[in-house]
Image (cartoon, rainbow, N blue to C red):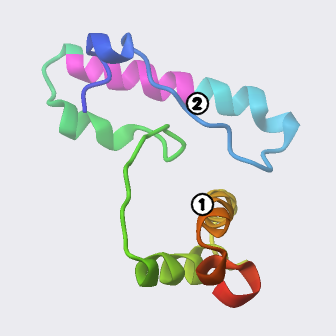
Amino acid sequence: CNYASGKFNSEITVIKPPGLDPGALDEWKEMVLMLEQTYLHYLDIGIKAQIARAILPNCLKTEIVVAGNFREWRHFFSLRCSIKAHPQMQELAELIRLRLSEQVPVLFDKEKTL
């Protein structure tokens, strides 16, 4: 993915980590901006996007499409709704689980899923 292309207006989009101390926010923003500028510079000097991308932060926004059967979704929830999972993944997994529980409550009722 080349973030210098017109599709992304030569900028990256990041998601502020939940729980980030407000006192660290300005420093975090500066670091993300520096990484974005370095990434774009690498592209300008001819480094391939796949290689330059290695310096981008984990908080980089991305969009994915995921499909699975009922058994796979139940397994996903058992892993990702757990308190051991990353907080952002827990939040996302719970939203998906709630949506599926509206559609198929007999299979995705919270008490029965976890």
What residue span does the magenta drawing correspond to? 32-43
Tag in front: 2 or 1: 1
CA–CA distance in space, label 2 to label 1: 32 Å
The quarter of the picture where residue 47 lies is top left
Observer-nearest of 54 and 102: 102
Going by the image, does 38 lie left or right of 59?
A: left
- The answer, for residue 114, to whether it is visible in the render is no
- The answer, for residue 9, to whether it is visible in the render is yes
Observer-nearest of 88 and 56: 88
Q: Secondary structure at mark 2?
A: helix
Of mark 2 and mark 1, the one earlier in the sequence is 2
Q: Looking at the image, is 64 positioned above or below residue 14?
A: below
Magenta-colored segment: predominant secondary structure:
helix
Dot 2 surroundings within 10 Å: few (below 14), some, or many (20 or more)?
few
Question: Label 1: which residue?
Answer: 96
Q: Quadrant of the N terminus?
A: top left
Question: Label 2: which residue?
Answer: 31
User: Is residue 47 part of the magenta span, yes or no?
Assistant: no
Residue 50 screen position, x and y as percent: 20, 39
Give residue 21's mark: none
Dot 1 surroundings within 10 Å: few (below 14), some, or many (20 or more)?
few
Q: Quadrant of the C terminus?
A: bottom right
